[in-house]
Amino acid sequence: MNETIEKLTSALQDHRGMDSEVLQLVNTELVQDADLNQTLLSVANFSAEDLVQFYAAVLDLEVFGSKELALEVVSPSVSLKFSRNYNVVPLESDDEQMRVVTATPYDPYPEKAIALASGKAVKICLAVPDLISRTIEKASADEASISELSDQLEQDLSFSDDGDIDRLKDLASEAPIVRLVNVIVSQAMELRASDIHIEPFEKRLRVRYRIDGVLREVDSPPTHSIAAIISRIKIMAKLDIAERRLPQDGRIQMRLQAQQIDLRVSTVPSLFGESVVMRILDQEQLVLRYEQLGFGKVNIQRFQKLIQRPHGIILVTGPTGSGKTTSLYTALSSINLPNKKIMTVEDPIEYQLDGIMQMQVKPSIGLGFSEALRAIVRQDPDTIMIGEMRDQETASIAIQSALTGHLVFSTLHTNDAGSAITRLLDMGVDDYLITSTVAGIVAQRLVRTLCQRCKQQITPLAEVVAEFKLDQYGISSPKLYEPIGCPECSGSGYKGRTVILEQMEMSSALRKKILARADGATIQSQAVSDGMSTMRMDGIYKALTGVTSLEEVVNATQDT
């Protein structure tokens, strides 16, 4: 326990109205580096101002008000993403010292990170969380925007898409275009976007970011810059800029704000030019812990028991962008031990996992999933992960691998766990092979999580309680929560996403249904009878505990 935590713990012990139960909870938060502020605000009845004054008195720190902070200049030496993630404001510094305004003086990481990056001593100051958030947003607005750069493009360059490849290469290398593409990517990172969509139309170029699963349109560059922007992206991704008739896939590695990021690039031809989608692969943001993904305790226990099997097939299903690959990476990481050899076949490899042999399929040279699988089974692996079970040939090899003593992980695109069985049957897999090899199926969706700063508790109507059976989840006087919107969540009321899931384990009753060629709904119903909690049930529980809203759950599960 560091000195700051010791001081705060001692002061809280003597604090008015601090009963033993609350104090124990506070001590736990301090030791675990959790959100002490939220605990003191919600449980100990502190106000935001009380919080700052308490920290200032105990730790002898300077406090900034709105007027004082408005007179300071935010230092550009620390990225806005870092400032936003840790809710800190680095101020312009002298040669030896930098002042950092925070609302969490108990968290040592921002201070250490900034000191290491700047090479200067850090002096911690205080302000209420909302003031810090407003200051960060103002600093973000002061940066060069897409619209400002677009105005510059209008003045500095004249674009024409005349098919001159050399001219396009020259334009794509010009400073305004380079800066514009960097700003598009940088802005996406600041807003925690997962994808960047650049779409050309007859009279405009539309740029959208997918944030927490929802597309949000931002300022767009001028239409006449389409060819140069797309050429710039294709050059960075090492794609053929002369080829505009066929889809292309590539990858970009770039450094922005002292951060290394990977972008998976896809281009497809459209009526008015090429549409580009860039998937942001941030290794630093990769979460490989079940709790952080949204797995509950019961689901963690069941899933861990499932993946400890020596052989069999474990499928993770869901639509595109539902977190299937991340769940598989988490499972592989948890069983990645020196006594096991794990190999994967992926298209593409999204993240690099230490200690695991990963193979990228390359259909252009004849290396598809089936060819890659035939090769790796001769590498004597214990566990195999197949990025996607796409056809009968791939499924057959996976089945044979499971029958010969391998543990096989893979994904399928189905709406629920029961439909995965019918999908395998449709692919031509024999029913007796499915019952012999498939050990379990996880179906999942991603739902947006409520902003913990601004969410509001509501009492559900009696008809809502009855319709969704809210009184059957072991929670007395069930409450729901709704989004409000604040600067921290950019007014959406949501921040981040979590998984809702269902786990179907093979049982004798299920095997009988499969051998009888039952439909997906019947198999799903049998799994529920065997004790499976559905995705909707998992989601409703998360809604009752304030993780997400009931509306999000209903929207995500209406087709299951």
Image (cartoon, helix red, strand yellow):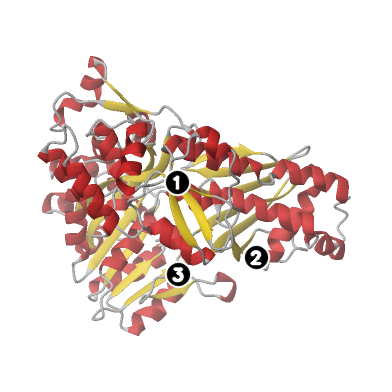
Residue to which mark 2 is pinned: 237
Residue closer to the observer: 300 or 305: 300
Where is 556 relative to 346, above or below? above
Residue to which mark 1 is pinned: 87
Quadrant of the snapshot with the N terminus: bottom left
Which residue is outermost to the bottom?
A: 379
Q: Which residue appears at 24% of the width and 25% of the height?
A: 479
Percent position (x, y) of residue 178?
73, 58
> Of helix, strand and loop, which one carries label 2?
loop
Quadrant of the snapshot with the C terminus: top left
**Quarter where residue 54 is shown:** top left
For discs 1 and 2, the disc positioned in front in the rendered view: 1
Q: Which residue appears at 81% of the width and 64% of the height?
A: 169
Q: Is residue 506 visible?
A: yes
Which residue is outermost to the top?
A: 462
Residue closer to the observer: 96 or 269: 96
Horizontal side, residue 497 vs residue 96: left or right: left
Percent position (x, y) of residue 193?
52, 48
> Of helix, strand and loop, which one carries label 1?
loop
Of the residues under marks 3 and 2, which one precedes in the sequence?
A: 2
Cβ atoms at labels 3 and 1 below 8 Å apart: no
What mark, if any, has residue 369 been given in the picture?
Answer: 3
Q: CA distance from mark 3 to mark 1?
A: 44 Å
Of the residues under marks 1 and 2, which one precedes in the sequence?
A: 1
Kindly identify the amino acid type of the residue bearing the numbered disc 2.
Ala
> Of helix, strand and loop, which one carries label 3?
helix
Horizontal side, residue 509 vs residue 378: left or right: left
> Quick one: label 3, few (<14), some, or many (20+) residues within 10 Å?
many
Percent position (x, y) of residue 357?
39, 77
Horizontal side, residue 290 vs residue 128: left or right: left
Percent position (x, y) of residue 192?
50, 48
Q: Which residue appears at 42% of the width and 38% of the height?
A: 129
